[in-house]
Image (cartoon, rainbow, N blue to C red):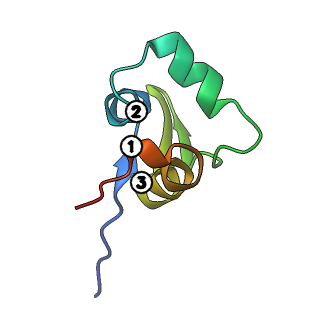
């Protein structure tokens, strides 16, 4: 049996990844039509595929993209 690992991000991880923005700002951003749809809506909140969030950050917030 093969297992596949999914990397997920919740609102807190998105908040940290976007530089410590407020919870209210994370809600505003994740509610935008151009933000990826959540992978699941859990009791504790929505979760997104990390790859989708990172792609959105690369497209919309390039200053936050790692450039080494």
Q: Residue furthest left?
A: 68
Instruction: State the separation of the CA atoms marked 1 and 3.
Output: 15 Å
Q: Are marks 2 and 3 in contact (CB under 8 Å)?
A: no
Closer-to-camera residue (12/55):
55
Q: Are marks 2 and 1 in contact (CB under 8 Å)?
A: yes
Q: Is residue 39 left or right of residue 65?
A: right
User: Which is nearer the N-term, disc 2 or disc 1?
Assistant: 2
- Between circles 2 and 3, the one closer to the viewer is 2
Instruction: State the separation of the CA atoms marked 2 and 1.
Output: 7 Å
- Splitting the image into 4 quarters, where does residue 66 fall? bottom left
- Splitting the image into 4 quarters, where does residue 11 fall? top left
Q: Where, quadrant-wise, is the N terminus in this rendering?
A: bottom left
Decide: few, some or many residues near mark 3? Use Cα within 10 Å; few <14, some 14-19, many ≥20: some
Residue at 29%, 78% in the rendered image: 3
Decide: few, some or many residues near mark 2? Use Cα within 10 Å; few <14, some 14-19, many ≥20: some
* Residue 11 against residue 54 in the figure, above or below: above
Q: Residue furthest right?
A: 33
User: Which is nearer the N-term, disc 2 or disc 3?
Assistant: 2
Secondary structure found at label 1: helix
* Residue 49 against residue 32 in the figure, above or below: below
Residue topped by disc 3 = 50
């Amino acid at each position: 049996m093969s297992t596949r690992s999914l990397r997920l991000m919740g609102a807190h991880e998105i908040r940290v990844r976007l530089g410590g923005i407020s919870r209210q700002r994370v809600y505003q951003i994740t509610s935008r039509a151009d933000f990826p749809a959540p992978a699941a809506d859990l009791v504790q909140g929505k979760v997104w595929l990390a790859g989708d969030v990172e792609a959105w950050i690369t497209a919309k917030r390039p200053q936050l993209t790692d450039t080494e």
